């Protein structure tokens, strides 16, 4: 399958990842980190060139598909995997990034929601878990379910977007933090390796935003100068490819607050210095239903940004 022609189904994505691991055993390893509510296996692809005497390299985490309907995220992760592998033998910078970093990719955090958005409801966002027998409402917003500032929406004006206690809402936070098999498996995997990760990226769509901490409050972290500066650099590098503009800033300043989001957990609990949420194309013309002919240009521009910020982070650590 060509990952740039069409949006793949979950099974196709896993087959593709497995194929990468089989073809490049010296560079890639496929790790099953758990299973979704509907028991789909969750697979992380680890990429990197083994380095002598250094079993643990500084690492980069990239996930997507926390929300079912945001298909451009997973396709962009696959594009980055493809470029890291295909360019490492000819581009010295990519070769360097494969030497010095280990890369971890979870292309679809919420496989049940992703599949449901393919088969039943194109605009499905949440997981597919069910907690209340007598409720018709299914699923939790996985990006409100992480165990940091969970359910705390104090200074938000648009309360329903921040986090909801109502299972029928699209931003339902779940019965407790990490109630979802998917967020729990991912959180555990990252937490166990938290000292390795120098960068956390989570791809969503849409709006063309490069979001910085914090998501749950208007306060800024103490190292926000570094965080903003790297984000602006990333957005500049992204723009270079096709002229696409991304707005940079914290959700409270340019979007809306949200509690229990993955990138706040990544910084607040896993202590990953650079943790960003990227809202990929577009700005609303197609919205979530981004045509497949944009898979390639989005992949190209995001890859341009990711390799640039990775290189800059290397010179800092
Ligand atoms: O609401 C979300 O979870 C994200 N937007 S989306 O349209 N993809 O659903 C934004 C998460 C960013 N964080 C905060 N808003 N705090
Ligand atoms: Zn999203």
Image (cartoon, rainbow, N blue to C red):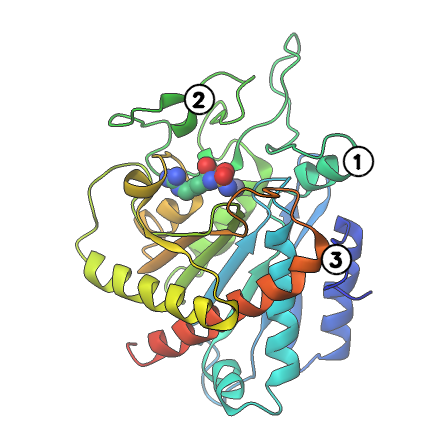
Distance from label 1 to label 2 (Cα)? 26 Å
Q: Quadrant of the C terminus?
A: bottom left
Instruction: Name which of mark 1 and mark 2 comes first in the sequence.
Output: 1
Q: What residue is pinned by disc 2?
A: 164
Nearer to the camera, 218 or 4: 4
User: Helix or strand or loop: what does disc 3 sit on?
Assistant: helix
User: Helix or strand or loop: what does disc 2 sit on?
Assistant: loop
Q: Position of residue 29 (x, y in %)?
A: 65, 70
Cβ at disc 1 under 8 Å from ligand 2? no
Q: Position of residue 78 (x, y in %)?
A: 65, 64
Picture residue at 42% right of the left edge, 75% below the top: 308
Picture residue at 45% right of the left edge, 58% below the top: 201
Q: What residue is pinned by disc 1?
A: 119
Instruction: Name which of mark 2 and mark 3 comes first in the sequence.
Output: 3
Q: Quadrant of the N terminus?
A: bottom right
Distance from label 1 to label 3 (Cα)? 18 Å
Quarter of image, res 88: bottom right
Q: What residue is pinned by disc 3?
A: 14
Find the residue positioned furthest to the left: 222
Instruction: Name which of mark 1 and mark 3 comes first in the sequence.
Output: 3
Picture residue at 47% right of the left edge, 75% below the top: 307
Picture residue at 63% right of the left edge, 40% below the top: 68
Q: Is residue 198 visible?
A: no
Q: Nearer the viewer, mark 2 or mark 3?
A: 2
CB contact under 8 Å: marks 1 and 3: no
């Amino acid at each position: 399958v060509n990952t740039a022609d069409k949006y793949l189904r979950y099974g196709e994505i896993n087959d593709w990842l497995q194929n990468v691991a089989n073809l490049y055993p010296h560079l890639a390893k496929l790790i099953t980190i758990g299973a979704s509510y509907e028991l789909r296996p969750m697979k992380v692809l680890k990429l990197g060139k083994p380095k002598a005497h250094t079993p643990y390299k500084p690492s980069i985490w990239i996930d997507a598909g926390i929300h079912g309907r945001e298909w451009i995220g997973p396709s962009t992760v696959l594009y980055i995997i493809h470029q890291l592998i295909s360019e490492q033998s000819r581009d010295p910078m990519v070769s360097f990034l494969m030497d010095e970093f280990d890369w971890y990719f979870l292309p679809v955090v919420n496989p049940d929601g992703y599949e449901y958005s393919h088969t039943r409801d194109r605009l499905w966002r949440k997981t597919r878990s069910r907690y209340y027998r007598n409720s018709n409402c299914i699923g939790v917003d996985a990006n409100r379910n992480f165990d940091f500032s969970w359910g705390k929406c104090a200074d938000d004006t648009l309360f329903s977007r921040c986090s909801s206690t109502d299972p029928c809402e699209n931003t339902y936070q779940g019965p407790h933090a990490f109630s979802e098999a998917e967020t729990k498996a991912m959180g555990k995997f990252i937490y166990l390796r938290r000292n390795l990760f120098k960068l956390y990226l989570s791809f969503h769509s849409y709006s063309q935003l490069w979001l910085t901490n914090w998501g749950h409050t208007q306060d800024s972290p103490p190292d926000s100068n570094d965080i903003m500066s790297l984000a602006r650099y990333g957005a500049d590098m992204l723009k270079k490819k096709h002229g696409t503009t991304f707005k940079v800033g914290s959700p409270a300043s340019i979007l809306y607050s949200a509690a229990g989001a993955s990138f706040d957990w990544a910084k607040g609990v896993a202590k990953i210095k650079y943790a960003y949420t990227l809202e990929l194309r577009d700005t609303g013309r197609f919205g979530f239903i981004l045509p497949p002919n944009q898979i390639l240009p989005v992949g190209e521009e995001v890859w341009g940004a990711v390799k640039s910020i990775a290189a800059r982070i290397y010179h800092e650590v």
